[in-house]
Amino acid sequence: MKRSKLIYTIIFISIGLYINAQSNIPIDSSYNIPREQRKFAKKYPYAFAAKDSLPQGVDEYRDVVYLTLNDTPFGKRDLHLDIFKPEKKGLYPALIMVHGGGWRSGNKNMQVPMAQMIAQQGFVTIAVEYQLSLEAQYPAAVHNIKAAIRWVRANAEKYNINPDKIAISGCSAGGQLAALIGMTNGIDQFEGNMGNLEYSSDVQAILDIDGVLNFLAPSSLNLKRKPNSADISWFGSSFYEKPEIWKEASSIYWANENSVPILFLNSGYSRFHAGQDELIGMLKEWGVYHEVYKFNIKVHPFWLFHPWVDETVLYMTDFLNKVL
């Protein structure tokens, strides 16, 4: 029996999977910083990973439980967040930060270096854990993050947060989630029932970093994709099987004249911006404030590495100062 378990463990690790020992939740570790850096190391040898390093003047609160799920297929499940806030007393705008990884991999720690840098500029930053597709498919992640926003409002006073000034950012799959969550302010079907329902999950701004806006756009909808592709795994179906789900998760279809300001930060890979040009046209027509910046580099997760993370943080904090 012990030998069998060892064999299974080796197989899972070889494909980037392992089982969380405490919760029996399958974890895909294939999206990680060393692996991403190896992809572009020859072309950009000067780039290096941003580090988890708490700046002076910033307090931190790690692995705070914001939600407990008691009846998941894997048993009791706590979801956590990391909070970084200025030491000085005051009331600060907050930024909810959502990591990427194809809705299947990655973790909140990948947002921490940016969260620390932004907190040093006068914001409370909150890196959020959410359920990935091996654990729970769409729309669980949306419900998790909406619950995290409600938790932040419920605990705003404790962490010196202005509850009327909360923005959401996300990177890659996290950008898609951030845009969808921000575009669906006040729409009941996206709320879920995961805690602090007496508080609002609305946000006042969106920062979408290389996150898809329209799953039905030609550059996003590859009908020949493999059954285990990231989006099919998350939705639990192909576009042919459930096109209504693919449309529902596309934030562009929820945009309207009351949409909140949005910042787009793009890499040199256009497929990660699917739907953006059309959405920008709509925002212009409605007079909704927006900004767009492009990093002309073939590095998708540019926000994880110096020198690009520094410019990313500059764009983000400048936008937040304008709109919050």
Image: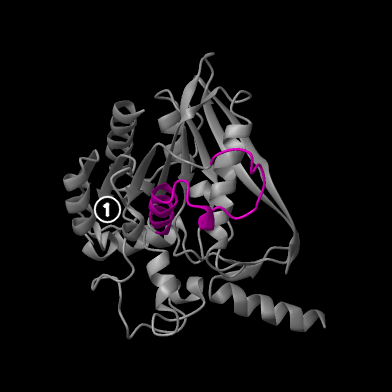
Where is residue 274 drawn, in percent x and y? 26, 63
Left or right, 234 with respect to 257, comes to: right
> Is residue 198 within the magenta segment?
yes
Please give the count of numbered marks on the rendered protein: 1
Which region is colored magenta?
173-200
Q: Is residue 269 above or below residue 127?
A: below
Q: Residue at x 29, y 62 (%)?
A: 272
Left or right, 27 with respect to 204, comes to: right
> Is residue 9 within the magenta segment?
no
Query: In the rendered view of the protein, which quadrant contains the N terminus?
Result: bottom right
Q: Is residue 115 above or below residue 11?
A: above
Q: What residue did someone put label 1 on?
A: 45
Q: Residue at x 31, y 55 (%)?
A: 210
Front residue of 59/140: it is 140
**Pointer 1 local density, CA inside 10 Å: few below 14, some 14–19, many at least 20:** few
Query: In the rendered view of the protein, which quadrant contains the C terminus?
Result: top left
Q: In the displayed orientation, state which residue is furthest to the top.
A: 89
Front residue of 56/293: it is 293
Where is residue 80 drawn, in percent x and y? 64, 46
